[in-house]
Amino acid sequence: MACPDFTISKSGRRGVGVIQAHSGLDYPFFAPSEDVRYLVADFYLAYEDKTVNGQYQPPALPLRIKYLYNFGCVENTPPSGFPTLVSNLGIIVVDANDSVVFDSIANSYTDLSWDWGDDYTVTEWRAPTATCRILIYKTWPETDDDKRNYDVYLAPVNAVLDSRTLYRIPNRVQSISVKNAEMLTGPYRGDVVFQNGWNTAIAVGGTTTTNLRVDTPITFSAVAGSGDGKYPCEPGFDINTVKFITQINGVSGAKGDFILSGKDCLWLRRPTDYANGITTVSATADLQIGADCKPCCACEDYASTALYMNHVRDRYKLIGTRSEEVRSVHETNIARWNEYRLCSVQSPLRVIFVPQRCPYMDVVMLLCNPCESCMPSTTLTLGLDFESAPAQDEEGAPLTAEIACGYTAMYATGINGLATSIETPSAFTYEVTFPTLQPGDSAYIKFRLKFSIKAAYLVQGVLTGNYVVSGQPITIDCDGTSTTPASATTAQMLYCDNAGNTEMPC
């Protein structure tokens, strides 16, 4: 079948549970191979130990997914060893020795599948001794460059499962068998019901908890008239329809008497009364059954576990605090960098005046490319204006500003101090053509002007630029949405006094 188009979502491939958004997507695997990466969002397997020669044998860790069936859309040939299909969706989990721990491909287990929102699909298999759930991604983020489709018959190169995805079910009572002499009936699974008979009664006591162990006492008593009542002996009663109690669990009593006793940590005794310092056995036929079995784990073990969990929590809390501080610094840096970049984008031109000995002035015209694309060849134009400058000298000659020879040089990529001609289309106007600039590059030209009138006056300059080919002005943005031309201005006094002498600052 043909794979459908990728579904785009703002929550596409976003981690859940152990991994939250933007924290990496390798979970529930450890260093997964690319053929299965970004497919599984979460995983859970509850399993039991296997029985080998009558002994429980746990699987050898780590566990891994060996096969996945029908979670992809790319038709491919089943790999060697792929089992015969029984289910529409399936998975096989093996241990470190390649022994099967869970197989829903070759076994017909109860399976359920449903969508969890728009971004995930849940599939669950229920076996008699195991439960497996897998959460599959359905959508991708728009900016993800790793979009991919997966094989229908998938045998991952490496799909080792994170230990947090696994739950080893502890040993527990699952069935009860009844032995009557040499005959064994059962096993009985599910709910087991004890029922009263003639002259017998069963009573459940209150539940208590001691050393984290829950105890619920059950009292079996044989009192005349209790349970189903006294054994009917009235005339007309058909004795053939009722059997007398002659054995309990295949054991016959001595002259009708039975002796019951507990074994190991179980005990069975008649209740007693204590009054005036004297212990008296109850006159009833009641028996009490109890246990003095030690808990599986002592209180010290639980306390040590709790302390260790607190220690791990404190470590994660410290890591979280440090990560928060790093994130805050990073966000501050991003804001500062964006501010600097915006300033650079809005100011691609610079002009600098440096006064020299009267009546000279050094000029620097600079062009920056703060954008992510090349800036084509441009022509920069500098126009001069004057404040408080004499219109002419003592001999009646007008004010001029000529370029001094030997001080003109351009600096750009591949151009280091190359002499460049400067055009003067009109009085006090200077034009220079700059080469193409790569993203992030800059170029500048410096030259020296000699003014014809030696006096103290202010020289002002305005720098603008146009692209050579299109003739359009350089603007203050990178994406072409702004129509505002970029420009730069500066002003500087000559190092001259009113007498025409050089007045250098100390």
Image (cartoon, helix red, strand yellow):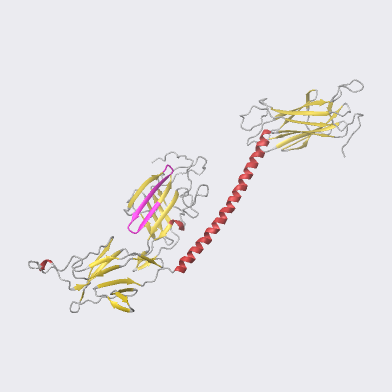
Going by the image, does 478 lie left or right of 18?
right
Residue with the most extreme top position: 396
| Residue 205 lies in the magenta-colored region | no
Q: Quadrant of the C terminus?
A: top right
Q: Whole-percent x and y of residue 27?
A: 48, 52
For the N terminus, give its image quadrant: top left
Q: Is residue 77 visible?
A: no
Main SS of residues in magenta:
strand
Indicate left or right for 429 with 152 as reference. right
| For residue 40, side relative to residue 389 (left or right) | left
Residue furthest to the left in view is 236
Q: Which residues are magenta?
A: 117-133
One can see residue 320 in this view: yes
Question: Percent position (x, y) of residue 187?
Answer: 26, 64
Instruction: Report x, y in % for residue 238.
Output: 9, 67
Residue 349 in the image, given as x and y percentages of width and height: 71, 32
123 inside magenta stretch: yes
Q: Give whichever of 224, 278 is nearer the camera.
A: 278
Query: What residue sits 89% from the left and 34% below the top?
Result: 503
Between 276 and 64, the one nearer to me in the picture? 276
Q: Residue 341 lies in what quarter of the image? A: top right
Q: Nearer the viewer, residue 187 or 142?
A: 187
Classify residue 426 by image quadrant.
top right
Query: Looking at the image, which is closer to me, 439 or 21?
Result: 21
Residue visible at 39% across and 58% down?
46
Q: Is residue 478 left or right of residue 243?
A: right
Q: Quadrant of residue 184?
A: bottom left
Give the answer, above or below, for where 484 lies relative to 84.
above
Against 37, residue 391 (above or below) is: above
